[in-house]
Amino acid sequence: MEHFLSKLSRNLYVIPGGFFVTKLFRKFFSSSSKTENWRNFEFRGVSMKVDIAKQMGNAIYWRGAHDWAPIFVLERFLKAGDTFIDVGANQGEYSLWAARKVGDQGKVVAFEPMPQLFGQLKENIRLNKSFQKSIIPVQLGLSDKKGEVILYASEDSNEGTNTIYNTDKFSIELGKIELDTLDQQLQELNIKDVNFLKVDVEGAELQVLKGALNTLKKHRPILLLEINKDACIAGGYLPEDILELLKPFNYTFSKIGLRGSLSKVEQLPDFCNILVIPQ
């Protein structure tokens, strides 16, 4: 029954109004267990293995994606043959959808520093044989300089919120991770072009972009950024500092709304995804 309803739920979620049916299914099959609970599924040509005991894994299983709005935007702007850089790849959701779009002639470079999530990323790549040629997984965090830092988690079950900033909420040490700059990594990986750069690193977005200035100047990629005010403050800056850093590059800024709609950024909310397009 669960398998049938989850398949139905994923197909319903991508149509208007389907959210409410999906929400009902998830509530009916919800579990408070902290024990790993793995599921495999295939949707629209993408196969994934997720832990439905975790918040993000559960959402992906029932919806087909953790958040469809930025995925819709990604699919709209990515083209066959493009190169997509995924900073904060987690278990590979964006990387897989990007690989589906760029095809055999394109390339996806997926950076994920946390060992457990990197293992999931590699497993999800393995499940998609047609994408294996396109995706390059790299177990590394990105910043504005090379080094290492401790990664922290909270007590909740959201595997997408691990951070390098120690706060009252995020105080559980997960161990040290290695850091490098995007500029240096792209040089070492011999990446010749960058068309689209997605950054979701729980407050370290500014540092990642500072370590990617040569990439921005040379390639002028489209950017997809998650903006979380609390996470930015934990990192010692404000969300507006990201916009200020990018202004000299002559970008336009749009907030991503429901079903991938775009609206001009007048004022940043406390949490949003923004699309940054070169003029």
Image: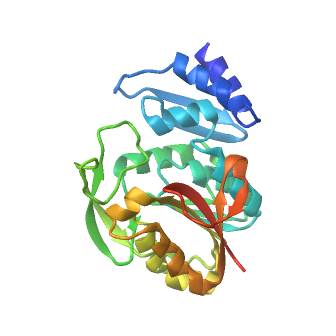
Viewer-closest of 147 and 249: 249
> For the point 60% across and 44% down, which residue is it?
67
Residue 145 falls in which quadrant of the image? bottom left
Residue 216 falls in which quadrant of the image? bottom right
Q: Specify whether residue 103 is in view.
A: no
Q: Position of residue 243 (x, y in %)?
A: 54, 74
Q: Position of residue 91 (x, y in %)?
A: 49, 47
> For the point 43% across and 34% down, which residue is it?
54
In what quadrant of the picture does the C terminus appear? Answer: bottom right
Q: Position of residue 250 (x, y in %)?
A: 65, 83
> For the point 61% across and 41% down, which residue is it?
65
Is 148 displayed left or right of 161 in the figure?
left
Q: Residue furthest front?
A: 267
Q: Specify whether residue 218 is in view.
A: yes
The figure's colour scheme reads: rainbow
Q: Position of residue 201 (x, y in %)?
A: 44, 60
Viewer-closest of 261 and 160: 261
Above/below status of 220 relative to 23:
below
Is 219 displayed left or right of 153 in the figure?
right
In what quadrant of the picture does the N terminus appear? Answer: top right
Viewer-closest of 160 and 100: 160
